[in-house]
Amino acid sequence: MSTGELPAHDHAARRDRLRGELAGYGIALLYVTDPVNVRYLTGFTGTYGRLLLAGDAGDDRLVTDGRYTRRAAAQAPDLPAVLARDPVPVVLDALGGATSAADGGGLGVEADHLTWADAYGLEERVDGHGHHLVATEHLVAAHRQVKDAAEIARLARACAITEEALSWLVAELVAPGRTERELATALERRFVDRGADGVAFPSIVAGGPNGATPHHEPGQRPLARGELLTVDCGALVDGYHADHTRT
């Protein structure tokens, strides 16, 4: 298992690749609201963050609030951060300055992420300023499907940690009398000790008849000699998930 430095993400290059598609959708400005997509395109991990992706890279903006001033500067140093609890005025200002807006380009939104209420409210305010919404689906996700070298390295690290921890669990801890919860807790602690940020999802440890229950939650049932044990687990490394199941 490698413990060296992971290659850096090139968030600007990702934004530029996506930027090249906006005109084809009639979009002057893309309003990215899905936190996973915001992180993919900027590196920002705060719970409140919006990316305004413009036709000109110099007009891109990261919208967040005062809780994340320092985090935005550290994680997305190449993007101007605008602090605003209500992002719509920032969106309208950016849309008004977008060169393609005058040519009929609209505000692209992530229709597969916005609630109906949010989309309706945004549309009312945008329409009132002479603009319109352009619904997109899976626009960023299509880019995320193709992993670059930095992403592959993180996936490989997450898988290596998961494999090592699972092998350790079987060799050192699995024995009659151990409870499912005891094994799950030890496994997840091992992930962190070996360099993971945490778990990709709550670990499933299912002994005996519990192995027939999909997504069983580990309980206090002790393992018995001669019965099957199913473990479904994964480590999390810098936002990238592993997923291993062994019986």
Image: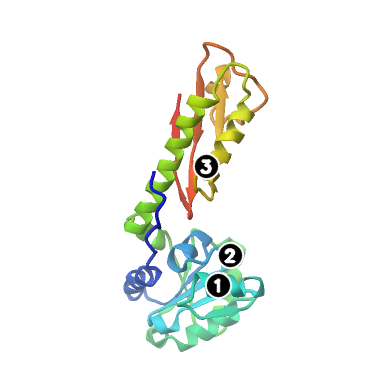
Task: Name the amino acid type tagged 2.
Answer: Gly
Q: Position of residue 192 (x, y in %)?
A: 54, 45
Q: Residue 204, located in which quarter of the rendered image?
A: top right
**Which one is earlier in the sequence, the residue at label 3 or at label 2?**
2
Task: Name the amino acid type tagged 3.
Answer: Phe
Look at the numbered disc 1 and give the secondary structure of its residue.
helix
Marks 1 and 2 close (CB-CB < 8 Å) = yes
Q: Position of residue 237 (x, y in %)?
A: 47, 51
Q: Which residue is mark 1?
A: 72
Residue 7 in view here: yes
Look at the numbered disc 2 and give the secondary structure of its residue.
loop
Packing grade of label 3 (10 A; few <14, some 14-19, many >=20) is: many
Q: Distance from label 1 to label 2 (Cα)?
A: 8 Å
Q: Residue at x 40, y 57 (%)?
A: 5
Q: Residue at x 38, y 71 (%)?
A: 15
Q: Residue 245, located in which quarter of the rendered image?
A: top left
Q: Which residue is mark 3?
A: 191
Q: Distance from label 3 to label 2 (Cα)?
A: 23 Å
Quadrant of the frame with the N terminus: top left
Task: Name the amino acid type tagged 1.
Answer: Ala
Q: Which residue is mark 2?
A: 46
